[in-house]
Amino acid sequence: METIGHWIGGQLSAQATRTQDVFNPATGQVAKQVAIAPRATVEEAIEVAQAAYPEWRNTPALKRARVMFRYKSLLEEHADRIIELIGAEHGKICHDAAGELQRGIENVEYACCAPELLKGEFSKNVGPNIDSWSEFQPLGVVAGITPFNFPAMVPLWMFPMAIVCGNTFVLKPSERDPSTALFLAELLKEAGLPDGVFNVVNGDKEAVDTLLESPTVKAVSFVGSTPIAEYIYSKASANGKRCQALGGAKNHAIVMPDADMDNVVSQLLGAAFGSSGERCMALSVAVAVGQEAGDALIEKMSAAMQPLKVGEHTDKDNDFGPVITKEHQQKVVGFIDSAEAQGATVVVDGRQPKVTGFEDGFFVGATLIDGVTKDMDSYQQEIFGPVLQVIRANTMDEAMQLINDHEYGNGTCIFTRDGEAARYFSDHIEVGMVGINVPLPVPVAYHSFGGWKRSLFGDLHAYGPDAVRFYTKRKTITQRWPSADLREGSHFSFPS
Ligand code: NAD
């Protein structure tokens, strides 16, 4: 059976004292093994990245960007292979994986703008014969730790920008779908990236802790669940590192009484069930304002869900695939059980989907639950499965209060035809990414991505302009070339 190793110094390496099963979630069978890096392997990757840093740091930004131009073309050329790797280990349907890759490529395109983004700021004559400028210098070795649900896109949120800013990088992808990251690394080498600038170590907590404890690693970008994000942020910060740690979510859509209900339903289908709901921006709660809107939503939604097809990733007719593991399947089903036990009504029940030929796969069918209340476990916690819960609210303010009271604040959306209501919503909602009739308001690559509250620990958001700030440190230089006529004596007061 194939064992997926690491990518260190531009080469595959398979050092491991332990391995872990990698499943094909559609068949439920073990398909590969992944090497779990011991501390020494991670330390080797960090050393290799550190050794590559001085030369890469001094490579002109335009030359660094040229690697990204070639990389974009290679990613497009090898899209089918990447989509297949994602599907085989994550399970997402090929058209969904193609969308993920496209959003990743857009980050590479943004990274191609490095010379412009790194130009810095200049002021002439801030004093007699004095000029001052600020420049953005790289940090050194930086690390990325990524989740299973976007094995291509989330790493691509991080390393293209980190690298074009002049840093070298160690990526620790999810051990549940590790192959994509290694192929992304091979393509970077083909694009002309010098060996050692980008490294991948597969592993678990031991690998992560090694990165967090190494004094050589200057910054850590993390995306994953909130408990781990909080751990990463506190440990990285305690060790003096810059850190951005993006966590979990519970994204609500408010359905106003004036909304176009057919449009709401078609938008919610994809946003709630696409990728089996395993997206940090998935809309998992619909808050219907008023009895009539709630009843119409349930009636139309349950009808629209009947033809949804869950199945294997290569079949383009399927709408979404399995969830990532058997344990996660049981967890999702457990949340549906608990909602029912706590008084909600399961209107469309996906607990026992029939997927012919894939009876052992980790499938959960699309599920609709009505009558959810804020005290229920299924509402308070992130389910991360194809489950849409409906809460009834009497007013828009009541609906907004629910969202503002929730511990997460990643994404949200309002469906309405009323501009005044939409403006009030976007002004006052305590959430980082807001949609107005846009169910998945994922910012494009030239804006930045990040939630509020316990969906993000740290100050700077991921990718876009914030990434330039995150992956560089500002240095401000003040320069004078005294001329004979301006030569001054000593001053003992503060320069002004
Ligand atoms: P996870 O937190 O289990 O794992 C994320 C990474 O952390 C993996 O690389 C994993 O190996 C590592 N890790 C796991 N346990 C660890 C530990 N105890 N110590 C150190 N490292 C550890 O997350 P996941 O299940 O892979 O991904 C799903 C979660 O990610 C969901 O909560 C989802 O909302 C979130 N997510 C958030 C965003 C966002 O932008 N906010 C984007 C994608 C996913």
Image (cartoon, grey):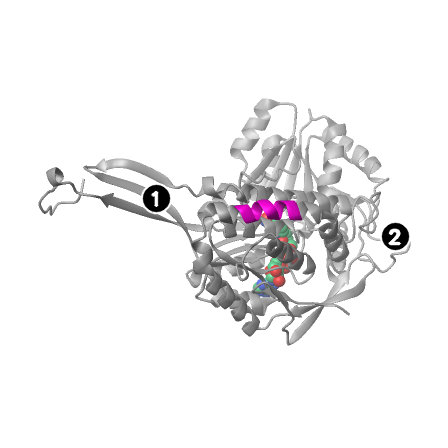
Q: Position of residue 2 (x, y in %)?
A: 75, 68
Quarter of the image with the N terminus in it: bottom right
* Above or below, 204 relative to 372: below
Q: Which circle's residue, 1 or 2, is located before the other in the chain?
A: 1
Q: Which residue is mark 1?
A: 134
Q: Amino acid at mark 1?
A: Ser
Residue 455 shows in this picture: no
At mark 2, the secondary structure is loop
| Crowd tier of the residue under label 2, counting other residues whose Cα lies within 10 Å: few below 14, some 14–19, many 20 or above | some
Residue furthest to the left: 489
Residue 109 drawn in magenta: no
In three-dimensional space, the C-alpha distance between marks 1 and 2, rounded to whole angstroms, equals: 59 Å
> Which residue is at 53% across, 62% downward?
196
Q: Quadrant of residue 329?
A: bottom right
At mark 1, the secondary structure is strand
* Above or below, 43 relative to 184: below
Q: Amino acid at mark 2?
A: Val
* Above or below, 468 relative to 338: above
Q: Left or right: where does residue 397 sit relative to residue 478?
A: right
Q: Which residue is mark 2?
A: 355
> Which residue is at 43% across, 62% downward?
238
Q: Which residues are magenta?
A: 66-74
Q: Nearer the viewer, residue 90 or 78?
A: 78
Q: Position of residue 282 (x, y in %)?
A: 67, 44
